Amino acid sequence: MDFEIIEWKDNTVIMLDQRLLPTEEKYLTLNTYQEVAEAIKNLTIRGAPAIGVAAAMGMALGALHSTAVDYNTFKTEMRSVSSYLYKQRPTAVNLRWGLERMERLIDAGKGLSVPQLKTELINEAKKIREEDIQTNRLIGLYGHAVLDDGDTVLTHCNAGALATAGFGTAIGVVYAAIEAHKKIEVFADETRPILQGARLSAWELKKNNVPVTLITDNMAATIMRQGFINKVIVGADRIAANGDTANKIGTYSVAINARYHNIPFYVAAPFSTIDLRIKHGDQIPIEERDHSEVAVINGKRLCPEGINIRNPAFDVTPAALISGILTEKGILKPPFETAISAHHAESALSS
Amino acid sequence: MDFEIIEWKDNTVIMLDQRLLPTEEKYLTLNTYQEVAEAIKNLTIRGAPAIGVAAAMGMALGALHSTAVDYNTFKTEMRSVSSYLYKQRPTAVNLRWGLERMERLIDAGKGLSVPQLKTELINEAKKIREEDIQTNRLIGLYGHAVLDDGDTVLTHCNAGALATAGFGTAIGVVYAAIEAHKKIEVFADETRPILQGARLSAWELKKNNVPVTLITDNMAATIMRQGFINKVIVGADRIAANGDTANKIGTYSVAINARYHNIPFYVAAPFSTIDLRIKHGDQIPIEERDHSEVAVINGKRLCPEGINIRNPAFDVTPAALISGILTEKGILKPPFETAISAHHAESALSS
């Protein structure tokens, strides 16, 4: 792919400014963890796996510029960097996952000097990025088994390369199928209010020569009824231990529509998106974002002043509507509780 | 209500320019049937009942400015005016209904002079407008029986006063319930791509002091799951003899979501929206509008160039998902085929 999402380069973080897509492909150079935090908050970078990588790189920048000389001061400082980054987005569990992985390295590095720790943290952030791309390739490799040659896939929001360090999860499965010489087309929901489908999924699919058709979110049901859609694949921001999946607002509606039309509905996500501390979907915190995202498009207000507006950024699709979860360890099938805990036990043994 | 949708005044048609709402409340003065046709096409006026009234008034303007002196020339001229108006929007049957009613008057007026016919046609157009408001009041009067005090109603697109000559159909039922001292709140789907919910429904509900909450279309399912919605009421652009209902794109998805959450789903429409010539929904022509409506908002393109876009303006909700059709003759219950033909037979007898 001839674009990058996030990279560590010359002690800075280079980040594609996704707010400007598809009009402009511009890369920002971030020098501080506060700049990374702001980029996470204002959606310069978005997508659960990408947020996890960005958080780790934010920690690395915080470490790099720390003036601490002893371990304890450094550790305290990094804790504060971590909590600052953590509070930027509440729903994606990968944010916490990325930060916790960096913190574990600090915990384990008690015998090291601060300069050594800084080097280790920077390397760890780079490694998290590399691993994310590798993980996505595996999700695609296992996941594309659900796609048949000639299928048309509906996707919602952007769980593509742009939502990750590279390759993508839901759209990664499409890329992997195409690499395996299957002919696949994609329908992309525009995904109001932020329009990640129109701006991002359409952009990267076009860029990668995948035939893509854009629809407004409310057209999905009718397109399904007309027989255009064979499979639905979406990403995830957090998956509960029972398989209930938080993802971009509108995903739940797509899942209900898919069920009504007997179309298989898949979630593609790395294991880091599964949060075993959350038993079921109702416990997943849902971010309510600024109402201007609904009320204003391209600087112009669409609705009258003085009315109520709701803007939950995510919804929860119950496990019962999900045909399978496509992960880097294979395809999880219902009942997800059993499938997830089996894989978790396995990785606990191997780590 | 302190706004008008369409009026006949001093031999012109005064029309609220709905494209400018909610920012600006501006009235256009139309002098020719071509201007009325353009206003129907470019959505200055929209909503099936309002289009029916506009078409009749377009015919009246055509008649007014006719230079024909004999009946046959006049009739031929009016036929051409009628077909010109007819081709502006294909889905709403009320357009044809309004034109046919005017043509019937010409057929019946063979003995009249052209000036007499012109006066009759102008009076008929004014009468169609008055009757539409009366019809909507009756839809509300019968229809609000489905609403309980304290209900919150979800509606899609705008089937309010703005979609008719006044009072509205789906939202008219809400107005009627409130006049009957029920406490009712409304959730309005923004209704992409044209945003009639955000721009029009929110505007008129606010203007009439009805509590309204705006959501993007893809939030409806989650708002239903959270228990906010007691009833769904939408309008219709054409209803087949079996009850299958064409309405604004996205209605079908709302109906599936309502069924999944066991929420009653009602269609509110005058009998003129029922097209007995159409046996079932698959036969209803669906207008595919310009793709720029999806691709561009407020003058800025949202998606990359060179991708496919779909823009069906309507979808068809199968009768099986509809709990009742609220009409000026009462509430039709399933099986609609029987209910519709019974009422049709009755009006054939009384007319």
Image (cartoon, coloured by chain):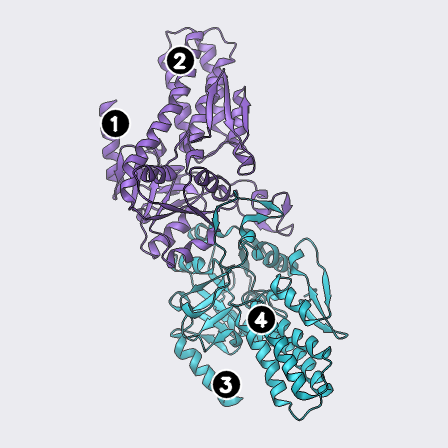
Chain colours: A cyan, B purple
Q: Which residue is mark 2?
A: B120
Nearer to me, B64 or A151: B64
Disc marking residue A49: 4
User: Do marks 3 and 1 share a chain?
Assistant: no
Q: Residue at x 36, y 33 (%)?
A: B273
Q: Kindly report the distance in space between the C-alpha atoms of the residues bearing marks 3 and 1.
A: 73 Å
Q: Label 3 lies in what chain?
A: A
Q: Return the residue found at the far bottom.
A: A111
Of callouts 1 and 2, which one flags the residue occurring earlier in the amino acid sequence?
Answer: 2
Q: Kindly report the distance in space between the C-alpha atoms of the residues bearing marks 3 and 2.
A: 84 Å
Q: Label 2 lies in what chain?
A: B
Q: Kindly report the distance in space between the C-alpha atoms of the residues bearing marks 4 and 3.
A: 19 Å
Above-or-below relation of B8 to B316: above
Q: Are marks 4 and 3 in contact (CB under 8 Å)?
A: no
Of callouts 4 and 3, which one flags the residue occurring earlier in the amino acid sequence?
Answer: 4
Closer mark to the observer between disc 4 and disc 3 = 4
Which amino acid type is shown beneath numbered disc 2? Glu
Q: Which residue is mark 3?
A: A347
Q: Is residue B42 left or right of residue B157?
A: right
Which structural element holds mark 2?
helix
Q: Position of residue B94 (x, y in %)?
A: 40, 30
Nearer to me, A350 or A316: A316
Label 2 Cα crowd, 10 Å radius (few <14 / some 14-19 / many 20+): some
User: Do marks 1 and 4 share a chain?
Assistant: no
Q: Kindly report the distance in space between the C-alpha atoms of the residues bearing marks 4 and 2.
A: 70 Å
Which structural element holds mark 4?
helix
Q: Which quadrant, please, contains the C terminus of chain A?
A: bottom right
Above-or-below relation of A282 to A229: below
Q: Position of residue B193 (x, y in %)?
A: 52, 45
- Can you see residue B293? yes
